[in-house]
Amino acid sequence: MSTASVALSAAEAASLPATMTALVKDKAGPGAVLQTIPVPTVGAHDILVRVDAASICGTDLHIYNWDAWAQQHIQPPIVFGHEFCGTVVRAGSEVTDVHVGDFLAAESHITCGECHECRAGRRHACRQAQIIGVHVPGAFAQYVAIPAENAWPASPSLSRDIATIEEPMGNAVHTVASTPIVGANVGIFGLGPLGLFAIRIAQVYGAARIWGVELSEFRAQLGRRMGAERVLNPLVEDVPAVLLEETGGEGLDVALEMSGAGPALAQALAGVRHGGTVALLGLPSKPMELNLADDVIFKGLTLLGIVGRRIPETWHQTRGLLEAGVDMSPVITDRMPLTEFRRAFELLAGGRSGKIVLYPNQEGGTGL
Ligand code: NAD
Ligand code: ZN
């Protein structure tokens, strides 16, 4: 299956179909269905994008499985999916800097532009953000309409698989870039796609040594391939004790918590040296209890909450890393047409995959 980006044909630019195939979370319960629905209309400040590739995020698995988080945040019916790249097929009347035929990735957070954070240049922390594929119709579809300001132009030479992972890679770039990494001993807890991206990014940012912590052997192997010197399995190893021993009794300088698992966070706090930093990206599914006095306060730790991507700094950094030749392709383990979504979600749930990329316009769609 070719991963090259696909230019817009003159026929497609001239006339769009009225309907499209989309993966819809149709009801409050597990699963999702492929439906034929109208192609979205485009507002004055919006663009319509033909989705060339859409990758699956852990959040999509929450939505698919209909867990507690999804039950609180998703209102069916909705097309989900928020990591994608594509080609602009329509631009609203007020859109000036994005054009039909442009190839792009997209920021998934639609920010208000008016709240304190947006006005202060911290749009990633917008208090009224709406997320594509969570609050508004998403990209597991042949076409998606988004505000033009969410477009992030991509070079046509970038493969569609790499362009679609710019968004989740940006989460990892934001996490690594949140604290000095040069010469640091770094532990990355949870080697899902984001933790795997973070290993290589931390290497590029100058980490001295990098350890991974992961339950799945499949992902541990990927972690070693991405550059972790050792990946610890918390089921068979005392993670903080091993980290202390390997760092001459000091502990990690920096821990990146990218699993969302309570035990991993406790081990990250215990494995970091006094005065160290723990950056929190993983989303716990429920509130958790921590020994704040001993593990944070008396150790003088810095805890960082990481949300989304800094807009636009993280996007510039992510593009720069890719252009500099940082290779994320080993993290992409599976590629398939959108019509095979069931197999994709089963694979992801089983922990035997890295990033999975879906092609909504191939085999079962209207065809490219
Ligand atoms: P993922 O679910 O694919 O990866 C999490 C990994 O953690 C899995 O490989 C799992 O085996 C591992 N894990 C689970 N328990 C563990 C434990 N006790 N010790 C070590 N590893 C353990 O998720 P992902 O797509 O890589 O995303 C990582 C996290 O970041 C998720 O929690 C996701 O919800 C979150 N996230 C946060 C933001 C944000 O803006 N803060 C954005 C995107 C994703
Ligand atoms: Zn805002």
Image (cartoon, rainbow, N blue to C red):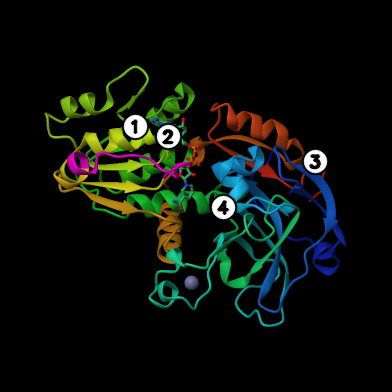
- Is 149 displayed left or right of 325 in the figure? right
Q: Is residue 165 visible?
A: yes
The CB of the residue at mark 4 lies under 8 Å from ligand 1: no
The CB of the residue at mark 2 lies under 8 Å from ligand 1: yes
Q: Is residue 366 visible?
A: no
Assess disc 3: are there few (<14), some (14-19) or many (≥20) residues with their C-alpha within 10 Å of its C-alpha.
some
Pointer 2 with pointer 4, Cβ within 8 A: no
Label 3 vs label 2, nearer the camera: 2
Q: Label 3 to label 2, Cα distance in Å?
A: 31 Å
* Residue holding disc 4: 163
Write the start and end of the magenta stretch as one range: 282-295
Q: Label 3 to label 4, Cα distance in Å?
A: 21 Å
* Residue holding disc 3: 363
User: Residue farthest to the bottom?
Assistant: 94
Classify the position of the N terminus by image quarter: top right
The three-letter amino acid code for the residue at tag 1 is: Gly
Is tag 1's residue or tag 4's residue first in the polypeptide sequence?
Answer: 4
Is tag 3's residue or tag 1's residue first in the polypeptide sequence?
Answer: 1
Label 1 vs label 4, nearer the camera: 1
Assess disc 4: are there few (<14), some (14-19) or many (≥20) residues with their C-alpha within 10 Å of its C-alpha.
many
Residue 222: % across, % down = 45, 29
* Residue holding disc 2: 191
- Is 302 displayed left or right of 362 in the figure? left
The three-letter amino acid code for the residue at tag 3 is: Glu
For numbered disc 3, what is the local secondary structure? loop
* Residue holding disc 1: 212
The three-letter amino acid code for the residue at tag 2 is: Leu
Query: Residue at image x 54%, y 28%?
Result: 351
The one nearer the camera, 252 or 68, is 68
The three-letter amino acid code for the residue at tag 4 is: Ala
